Structures are given as structure tokens and as C-alpha cells.
Amino acid sequence: MEKHIQTFLNKVSYLEIIVATFTLLLVFLFQTPPETCIDPTHNPYHKPHPRSSCDAAAHRPITTITKKNRRLWSTHTWRKSVDSFSSIFHDLQTLKHISNHTHALIVSAGGGQAVMSLKEIGLHDITGVELVDSPPLVSRADPHNLPFFDGVFNLGFSAYLDQGLFPWRYVRELERTVMVGGVVVVCVEECGNGEMNEVLKLFKKSEFSQARNVTLMGSKMTMVITKRIKVRS
Ligand SMILES: *[C@@H]1O[C@H](CO)[C@@H](O)[C@H](O)[C@H]1NC(C)=O
Ligand SMILES: *[C@@H]1O[C@H](CO)[C@@H](O)[C@H](O)[C@H]1NC(C)=O
């Protein structure tokens, strides 16, 4: 066989291996239960979830999760993003928007970097949600339809409002779940007053408190702090 044909065939078989691996991975992923699965005993405010699908998740081997997390949490990238969140949470602490007793909600929490950062600062009641769960730091929930009752958090935080499919619904849910007197904080791409006012228009039950230009994981962002107020419905 000619050499270049042999090389081509080798490439094809590599491709097959890659495709097969991905297929296996997908099959594995779709075996996990489809419903949002937050342990209802963990937080009394969570709305109840269908029992059956959560039972399935309980059988996921804990040891695998622990091992995977230990590896992830020891990486440089992970540490850098946790520290990056810590610097902005320190700001919020200095501004007296958070204390150790703050009941915090992080929406679009990713792998849980912000959750870990708040834990390290000293908060003990933190809920992180994301479309894909990352136990034990982050549960699965849709930011547009949060599985929590009204007014149960003191702080609602998201650094990824920009990525929400429906920003007004995203903000509405943050406002709904934060109690009157609490704060809703969002970080958006760094902007001036005009654009910030556009962001503020999404808020229907909060008033502007402060804005700060911050650096989050290397990106310049504007952190918008709003205070949840009482509105007549
Ligand atoms: C908050 O918690 C941290 C860590 O547990 C602790 O070092 C700090 O003193 C606490 N702050 C207050 C005001 O209690
Ligand atoms: C943030 O930076 C922008 C310029 O990129 C500026 O227009 C804006 O006023 C700054 N915002 C704050 C709160 O400092």
C-alpha cells in the first residue's frame, strides 16, 4: 500500500476511536437522571422534587466524585478562579453586603468556584446552581426557573447574566428568591453608565446601590449591586 494511503487510513481509525469514545461518554452522560435533583433535606426552602429521579442520583458512587473533585480543586486554574471571586466577595464584605450569616445563592455557578470562595470567606449557607450539576458544590437548576420559594436568600449573585437566554427572566428569578432588604449582584462585561442603565432596566423589584469595575478571571467586568425593595404587586 502506498505510504500516504496508509497514513490516511491511520487517521481514519484514530477518528473512529475518538468518535466511539465520545459516543460512550454521551451514553454515560444521558444515564444520569433528567430531573433537577437537589436534596430536599439539605435546605427546607427547596420546592419538593419528584422522588423517583432523585433516588437514582443517590446511587452515583461518591468516591468517584471525591476523587475527581480533589484532582480538579488542586489545579492552578481552579485556584486562580476561586481567588478571583474572593477578591470581589471581599469587596462585598467591606461594603457590608455579606457577612458569615448571609444565605447566598449563586446562579450560573459553573463548577462551584464562587461557592468555594464564599465558603472560604466564612459563609456556611451557600446554594450554587447551574444547568449541569457539579456535586457537592453545585446543584442542577434552570436560572430562568429557580426551584426555590420567594425571598429565601439575602444575596443573589451571578457573574454570567450575559449568558442567560432570557435576561429579564433571569433577573426576575434572582429578585424573586432574594428577600426584601437583601442584595442582588450581577457582573456584566465592563460598561459605562448608559449600558449599565440598560442592565438596571431588567430589575423591577430592586434599586441601584453601587457599581464597581472589577477583574474576574482576567476579564474586565462591571459589578452592579442592587438592593431588593418592597414593591406593590
Ligand atoms: C467569619 O468566618 C471566618 C471563617 O470561619 C472567621 O475567620 C471570621 O472571624 C468570621 N467573621 C465573623 C465576623 O464572625
Ligand atoms: C467602568 O469603566 C468604564 C470605562 O470602561 C467607565 O465608563 C465606568 O464609569 C466605570 N464604572 C465604574 C463604576 O467605575
Image (cartoon, rainbow, N blue to C red):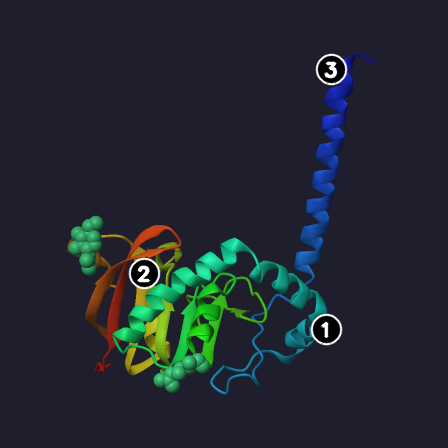
Residue marked by disc 3:
4
Residue displayed at 67% across by 72% down: 57
Query: Which residue is outermost to the right?
Result: 1
For label 2, being within 8 Å of ligand 2 is answered no
Q: Residues within 10 Å of mark 2 (few under 14, many from 20)?
A: many
**Circle nearer the viewer, 1 or 3:** 3
Q: Nearer the viewer, residue 166 or 211?
A: 211
Residue 199 visible, this orientation: yes
Amino acid tagged 3: His
Disc 1 target residue: 59
Picture coordinates of residue 138 (x, y %)?
53, 69
Residue wearing tag 2: 187
Label 3 crowd (10 A; few <14 / some 14-19 / many >=20): few
Give the mark nearer the N terminus: 1 vs 3: 3
Residue sitting at 51 percent across and 58 percent down? 78
Task: First in sequence, mark 2 or 1: give its number.
Answer: 1
Q: Find the distance from the CA under tag 2 to the CA under tag 1.
A: 36 Å
Residue 211 x/y as whole percent: 22, 64
Tags 3 and 2 touching, CB below 8 Å: no
The three-letter code of the residue at mark 1 reads: His
Judge by depth and name the residue closer to the eye, 4 or 88.
88
Q: Is residue 83 left or right of residue 197?
A: right
Q: Position of residue 42 (x, y in %)?
A: 55, 83
Q: Mark 3 to mark 2: distance in Å? A: 52 Å
Where is residue 67, by image quadrant?
A: bottom right
